[in-house]
Image: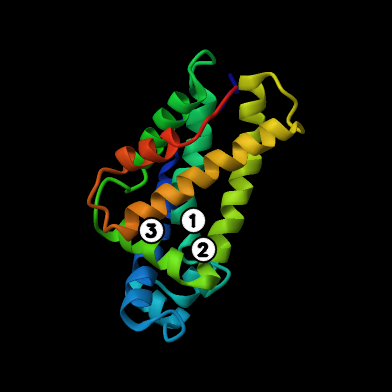
Amino acid sequence: MTSVSTSRPSLTERRREATRYEIAEAAAALFSEQGYEATTVDDIARAAGISLRTFYRYCPAKEDALTPVLTAGVATLVEEMALRPAAEPLTEAAQAAFTIATAGARYEGPGQTVRLIQVMSRVPAIRLRWLAAARAMQDRLIPVLATRTGRPESALETRLLAAVLIDAVTVALEHWAAEGGHDPLPAVSARALALLRLEE
């Protein structure tokens, strides 16, 4: 298995993460209520209770406001996949990793995260950021899958597996949010993964 750090984030990092969520939640609420184009960075900073300078410390631009939150669960998925037993079937490993990742990323049910993902899906500028981040996660997943399968990282099969898994996660999240988050997210992701034919 690939070795990953399991140390608890520092207090400073936890505070930064909390600030990222506050910015993202404020931005999502404003984007939903008054539209993406009509919402300014000043509006987001004011709603989040931070200064404009603090906003730009966390987000280079308005369209980046949601990216850290939307990618957090996918990043954890990669880390959890690296910890799964090598003998575990890939679909089962992916489902277990996804369940753990989403349990810690505010994807438990309807509410703010549903709104975050709905905004991400509907606003082209934000969706481009999300798709770029998902592609970066594919690249991080490739070494993990190469270790599991014994194939080279450059192999077509390895790269395709990474793409399929990340796309499945993305589609499951978007479908869950589009349906209002009524069904448990692990059940939605299990349905998505069950449609795949993954071979190691």
* Residue 131 screen position, x and y as percent: 57, 57
Which is more foreground, mark 2 or mark 1? 1
Q: For the residues marked 3 and 1, what is the alpha-carbon distance in whole angstroms? A: 8 Å
The circle on residue 58 is: 2
Q: Does dot 2 land on a helix, a strand or a loop?
A: helix
Q: Nearer the viewer, residue 102 or 169?
A: 169
Three-letter amino acid code of the residue under disc 2: Tyr
Res 150 quadrant in image: top right
The circle on residue 88 is: none
Q: Does dot 3 land on a helix, a strand or a loop?
A: helix
Counting other residues with Cα less than 10 Å from the Cα at mark 2, is it few (<14), some (14-19), or many (20 or more)?
some
Mark 2 or 1, nearer chain start: 2
Q: Which residue is mark 1?
A: 68
* Residue 184 screen position, x and y as percent: 26, 43
Three-letter amino acid code of the residue under disc 3: Tyr
The residue at the point 49 percent across, 35 percent down is: 196
Residue 4 falls left or right of residue 177: right
* Residue 140 screen position, x and y as percent: 63, 39
